[in-house]
Amino acid sequence: MSDQTGAEASAPLDVVLLVSRARGLARTGEPDGALRLLREAETTELGSHRDVLDLRARVHAQRGETAEAAECWRRVLARHPDDPAARAGLTRLGRTGPVAALGRHRTRTALAAAACVVTAVVVGTVSTLDGPRTARADTDRAAGRQSPGADGGREPGASATAGAGQDKDPAAARPAAKLAQDLRAPGLRVTVHGDDSVEVAFTQGLFSEGAQLTPAGARQLALLGERLGGRHLDVTVHGHAATVPGAPRSGGSVVALWRALVAARELSAASGEPLTAFTTDSADQRDAPYPDPARNRTVTLVISPE
């Protein structure tokens, strides 16, 4: 009985490991390798798991293989009719077909024509290919670009750096900063990296030994998972392990990888997001977040808005 229970408990981790490996290949520009890995799982029960099929569908969709993507998501819905990821995927595919593309093209054309008319009325004269600098500069600033010679109106003595800072759209840094603000909570150390990612570390260790979560660690992951739910995020979970005498000082460890897998499973359950939303790996021992071993029985997350 205990052996059977252990096998059932390890099945979700097998899925996490497979999905994590395939997703890592896809993210590093190897979609063929990712699909090959996922197709090989067809000979086992893993191949029909919703998270495996969901990732297959996403990779197919990114390659423009909409029929294959739709088939994978339909297989998910055949077993799980209310699966939100599969329903959303099929809905997106419905908006990317030839008819939808034609509709978007016509919409963009109509909007562009309307914009030209409005600009002509306001500015007075606009040339289609080479309009007055004022009109182009306004359009470029609205799109986040800088027109050639746009610094011509800068006050004497103003530096190029200052001008660039003034022209930069403050919304560019908003997603990561807003995400960090939403995630901050007691027990979490949240750090913004640049404009596009947030690192989350736990101030106390999550695991007692091996990949066994402490009660407090399970609660922390559940609370964080709830905050991640319903967002479009790219999440990488890095597992860490305390360095012990005689153990390798670099190269990662199996214990650290299992901790990342367990954490991804807990975050997925709490957030309602599929396991395909989480990439897992073992961090190098040299990248441990803390100097003391107890707190390094943990994971860290790097989260980017998609």
Image (tube, rainbow, N blue to C red):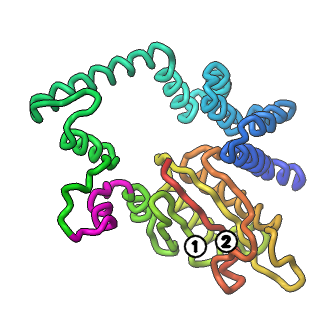
Q: Residue at x 52, y 55 (%)?
A: 304
Q: Position of residue 297 (x, y in %)?
A: 70, 75
Q: Is residue 292 above or below residue 49?
A: below
Q: Is residue 105 left or right of residue 13?
A: left
Q: Is residue 287 above or below residue 109?
A: below
Which amino acid type corresponds to the residue marked 1 in the rendered image?
A: Phe
Q: Which residue is mark 1?
A: 202
Q: CA distance from mark 2 to mark 1?
A: 7 Å
Q: Is residue 277 left or right of residue 123?
A: right
Q: Residue at x 50, y 63 (%)?
A: 198
10 Å crowding of disc 2: few (<14), some (14-19), many (20+): many
Q: Which residue is mark 2?
A: 298
Determine if residue 199 is in view. yes
Q: Is residue 218 left or right of residue 166?
A: right
Q: Position of residue 53 (x, y in %)?
A: 69, 33
Nearer-the-camera pick, 6 or 306: 306
The answer to which image quadrant residue 80 occupies is: top right
Start-end of magenta stretch: 157-172
Mark 2 element type: loop
Q: Residue at x 63, y 51 (%)?
A: 278
